Amino acid sequence: MPEPTPVTMSATLAADEALARRRRAGERVLSMASGEIGLPVLPALRDRLAAAADENRYGSVAGSPALRTAAAGYWERRGLGVDPGLVVAGPGSKSLLFALLLAIGGDVIVPVPSWVSYAAQARLVGARPLPVPILPGQGGVPDPDRLRAAVADARAAGQNPRAVVVTVPDNPTGTVASAATVRRLAEAARELDLVIVSDEIYGDLVYDGSAPAVSPALHAPERTVVTTGLTKNLALGGWRTGVARLPDGEPGRALHTRLVAVASQIWSSPPAPVQSAAAYAFGEPPEVTERVAASRRLHETVVRAVAARFTAVGAQLAPVAATCYLYPDFEPLREQLAATHGVHDGDGLAGLFSERYGVGVLPASAFGEPARPLRIRAATSHFYGDTDERRTAALRAADPLALPWIRESVDRVGEVLADLTGARVPGALVPHP
Ligand SMILES: Cc1ncc(COP(=O)(O)O)c(C=O)c1O
C-alpha cells in the first residue's frame, strides 16, 4: 500500500486552536487568524433547526428538494438561474469543494495567494496544485494571461490541468476581481477546456459602495461550478452546510452524477435538521437579508478602521472591498523590521505578532506564497464580542467602533503596530473615524 499523502492541519484552524489554548492559560491574546464570523445565530434559523430536530432519516444524497429549490432561487435572484436538480447540498462548501476536485480529476490551477485548503485538498485527491499569481489588487482570480502560459507549460510537461479554482470575493485579500478580469478568466478557461470552480462563499459580503462581484458562471455557464453556503453571510460555520450549482448541459450533468456518487460514499446526505433551516435562509426572507446586510456593514466598518491602522504605520494594503480580511504588505518596512526585530519574511512577521504581542495572524506562506514577502492575513471577525449580547449590540450599533470591546481590539492593533514599527503616537496618527 502506498504511503499516505502528507497532510497538515489547516493553518487557520490550527492558529485558532493555539490561541484558544493560550487564552485558557490566562494570556492576553487577540485572534485575527481565522475567519470564524463571531456573530450569533439568527433566532428564526435557530427555531427552524430546533423544529426539525426529529428529522433523523438520511434523506436524499444531493440534499432535500426544499433546500435545493431554495438555493436555486437564491442563485436565480443573482442572475444565475439553475434547475434545482443540478444543485447539490453538502456538509459545508469545503466538503463540496473536495468532492468536486475528486469528481473532476486532473490537476488544479490555484490562485496565489489563495485560501489555505485548495492546494491541500488538491494534494489529498492526488492532484497537483498548479499555482498562478493574481493581478495586483484583484485577489481570488489567477491572471488570465499567466493562466494560459501555466496551462501550456503544464501540458507540455505531461501534467493534466483540468480545473481552475477562483474565489470571488477573495479570502485572503478581501478584494474582488474586476468584471473584466473574471470575463477574461472565463474566456481563457473555455479556450483551455478547464472547469471553473468558483468559490462564492463571500458573495454576500461585498461592501455596499464597492463594485459587485461577478461570477464566472455568467460568462462560461457551461463549465462553471459555483459553491456557496451560510458560514460567512450568516455565521453558521458550525452548522456545516453548503451548496454547489452545477452547469447545465451534458458535461455538467455528468459531473453532477459523479459529485453525487462521491457524496454518497463520503457523507451520505447533508444533516437533515440543518437543511430545514438552510432552506429557509436561502429563501431570503426579510429578517435574513437584514441580518446579512447588518453583518456586511459591521465587517466594513471594523475592517476599514483596522486597515487605517496598518496604512498609518506604512504597510501597503489594496483597498478592501469585501469580507472581514486584510492582507497588508510590510515590504516598505523591511529594513526596519530586520534591524529592530530580526524579522526577514512573512513567517517571521506572523511569529512576531503571535509571540511578542499575542496577536494571531497568518503568514502569506499559508496562502501559497513564498516565505520572503512580508505579508500577513488578518481577520477582524473575532472583534465583535465574546457573548451573544455583545455581538447583537455590535450588529445593531450605529457606530460599532464606539462599543468599548470593539474599540479596545482596534486600539490594540494600533498599539501593536506602533510598537512593532516604532511609530510614535498611534492614537494621534489614526484618529477615530
Ligand atoms: C474561501 C473559503 N472557502 C470555503 C470556506 C469553507 O466554508 P464552509 O464552512 O462552507 O465549509 C472558507 C472558510 O473559511 C473560505 O474562506
Image (cartoon, rainbow, N blue to C red):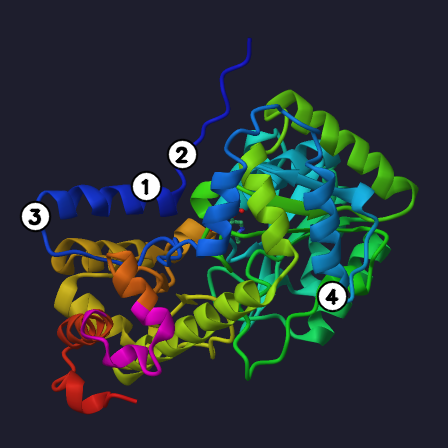
- The residue carrying mark 2 is 8
**Mark 4 Cα shell of 10 Å, populated few (<14), some (14-19), many (≥20):** few
Q: Is residue 401 visible?
A: yes
Viewer-side residue, 152 vs 433: 433
Residue sitting at 26 percent across and 64 percent down? 390
Q: Is residue 45 magenta?
A: no
Q: Which residues are magenta?
A: 393-405
Residue 329 visible in rendering: no
SS for dot 1: helix
Q: Amino acid at mark 1?
A: Ala
Q: Residue furthest front?
A: 51
Q: Circle 1 sits on which residue? A: 14
Q: Is residue 137 left or right of residue 192?
A: left
Name the residue type under label 2: Thr
Q: How far is disc 1 from disc 2 in space, using C-alphas?
A: 9 Å
In terms of depth relative to the viewer, which is nearer, 342 or 79? 79
Q: Which residue is mark 4?
A: 77
Task: Kindly report the distance in space between the C-alpha atoms of the residues bearing marks 3 and 2.
Answer: 28 Å
Residue occupying the far top of the picture: 1
Nearer to us of marks 1 and 2 is 1
Marks 4/3: CA–CA distance: 48 Å
Few, some or many C-alpha atoms within 10 Å of disc 2 (few <14, some 14-19, many ≥20)? Answer: few
Say the numbered circle drawn on residue 26.
3
Q: Residue at x 51, y 72 (%)?
A: 293
Residue 68: where, in percent of width, then height? 72, 45
**Between disc 3 and disc 2, whose residue precedes?**
2
